[in-house]
Image (tube, rainbow, N blue to C red):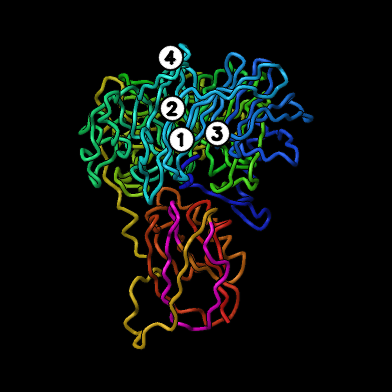
Amino acid sequence: MKSTHTIVLVTIFLFASQFSIGQLQSAMAKKEAEFYKIVNVPIPDDVLLEVGGLALTDKDKLGVSTRRGEVWLIDKPYSQTPTYKKYASGLHEPLGLNFKDNSFYLSQRGELTRLEDKDGDDKADVYKTIYSWPLSGNYHDYSYGPKFKKNGNMLVTLNLSWIGHGASLSKWRGWLLEITPEGEMMPIATGLRSPSGFELNADEEVFYTENQGDWVGSGRMTHLEKGDFAGNPEGLVWTGEPNSPLKLKMQDIEEQSGMSLYEYSKKVPELKAPAIWFPHTILGISTSDILFDTTGGKFGPFEGQLFVGDQGHSKVMRVYMEKINGVYQGAAFNFVEGFSSGILRMIWGSDTSMFVGMTSRGWASTGKENYGLQRLVWSGKIPFEIKTMKAQDDGFILEFTKPVNKGMAENPSAYQVTSFNYKYHNTYGSPIVDQQKAIVHTVELAPDGLSAKLKIDGMRLGFIHQIKAATLKAQTGEKLLHDTGYYTLNEVPGGVLKSKPTQKMEAAKGVAQYKRTNEMPLTWINGVDRKIGIGTKPGLKYDVTEVIVERNQKIELTFNNNDDMLHNLVITQIGIESVNKVGDLALKLGLDGADLNYVPDTDLVLNHTGIVQPGTEEKIYFQTPSKPGEYWIVCTFPGHAASMRAKLIVK
């Protein structure tokens, strides 16, 4: 699915008790489980259920398409004794599934297909091509969908290919397409890079999720309308086609504008700024499916909100969205983590539990399993959460799921607000830029204790606003289950921002990292003793498992990132505890992580590279330790540390 940035995937094949990050995640998952329980749907040992799509039939059987080219039909999927039957096979990696009028519909890599069981034996008798599109043969040519409109037309999205960067190597790659049941195709919007997740709301408005990559600073969700350009210019190669709804060209987009995407959208009217940003490595790293809460309150207190899956972090996020001056925007929060594999698909069951379909092969995820099928079930208990976050022209209104402690909630120091942004450029991803603290001046608490209006100086249009309320408690004494939200501010009521400006913060990237030496030290008169090269391979791994060196050797190490996602290389002290601790500390760097190359300032780190872009390399120089032993080489990009490591054996 995603880009094999794969989704800028993140993986941590949990080393259970050995790995402290896994322990921290389990602690949060345990708290969340009091309110939302993850229940396994048993899978037979001989079924490789690498989920690509989920759909319920009108008989409440669960259809599952797999990356292995099969469709399985599961009877009694809510029980612990489901039965599996192979409905179809021989398909080409279908990464979507839908059901309508006694037929399954799915997007294979090269076509939209209808499957029909004519004789009622739960096996497809008809495999009918509705519409086909060309393939380049590139491994990254994923296709997703379909989603049905009320008129019976279907929407599909097509992934860009990958040739060191995203590229539209065959027609309509990077586009949202609308296709009629008769096979007529209408291109709707482009600028998509890795559009695995997309959904329609009750008004048939389309939203899609995007993964970090070239032209994509961080994961995000965008409202797509006909003629929109979502940011990656590779799909613009097809705007000369007679049925294209826009005429913008690739050469109209600057590769390095120095602007944010919001700023650049003011220059290029076709460019649609995201409705929601998901801060990379902080909320997730590879956004996937979107699911609107249409349960009428049967899944908790978040009716009308959206749930968004993350493949790399094996979790579900929650989004409150509002429309101001005709523009969608809103806040994203953590919701439930700890799923068994990388989340790709989510649908509602007839009992209003959430089916979650997962896969990780080649894409990697924090959940250690290669695939999985689980249900998320609400316990009936209401967690203490920030339910909504609504923009005002001079602050935000926070609504809570339970009445807050009055003394705490009325104290402005209980809330910390920081705004920041990402660069819009052709480089893979973006560091956090233009970070600035805001000031909460006053708090006006509603009489029922369920909402608080924060008057804030330092709000900025076009920026993500992190709000943290770590000390806040409910009247019952509970702390917030998730104390941080991220609001994407595109508009304010009335159209004029009245929040006063504040002083800009100093950039963390100015901090010198003395353990990163990119030039040979002048004291090495006789040069290096040894040159070492280390590369990468799929699945978040270095291309070596161990490197043997002598004591006190002068080393020139070249780290070649031949992967399609960001990595670094960090050398740590002797012992598994050291490498685990360094990976843990890297996760805690928060908004400053990218500027610090995700390398924590600790004596456990001996040497390191910076963050190395896909398809590039970096040389570092260091002298091996004088003490023999097993040291470690590890990638500390958040989520990679558990699997992307190798031993450095000093003899």
Question: Along the polypeptide, which appears first: circle 2 or circle 3?
Answer: 3
Q: Quadrant of residue 115?
A: top right
Is 528 colored magenta in this rendering?
A: no
Identify the residue position indicated by label 2 in the image: 389
Identify the residue position indicated by label 1 in the image: 485
Q: What residue type is labelled 4?
A: Asp
Q: Which mark is residue 203?
A: 4
Q: Is residue 469 above or below residue 324?
A: below
Name the residue at the bottom extreme. Answer: 526
Would residue 520 appear left or right of 131 to someone viewing this image?
Answer: left
Give the magenta-colored segment's residue range: 541-568
Spatial CA span between label 3 and label 4: 27 Å
**Which dot, 3 or 4, sits closer to the camera?**
3
Q: Look at 72% across and 29% down and name the residue there.
A: 85
**Which dot, 4 or 2, sits closer to the camera?**
4
Q: Residues within 10 Å of mark 1 (few under 14, many from 20)?
A: many
Residue 143 spot, x, y in % from top left? 47, 34
Spatial CA span between label 3 and label 1: 34 Å
Q: Residue 94 carries which label?
A: 3
Would residue 245 appear left or right of 348 to someone viewing this image?
Answer: left
Spatial CA span between label 1 and label 4: 26 Å
Q: Look at 27% across and 19% down and name the residue there.
A: 494
**Residue in the foreground of this view, choosing between 580 and 74:** 74
Q: Look at 57% across and 70% down and name the residue there.
A: 546
Would residue 377 appear left or right of 172 to someone viewing this image?
Answer: right
Residue 565 spot, x, y in % from top left? 44, 51
Q: Is mark 4 on a helix, strand or loop?
A: loop
Q: Is any atom of residue 418 visible in this view?
A: yes
Q: Residues within 10 Å of mark 3 (few under 14, many from 20)?
A: many
Q: What residue type is labelled 2?
A: Met
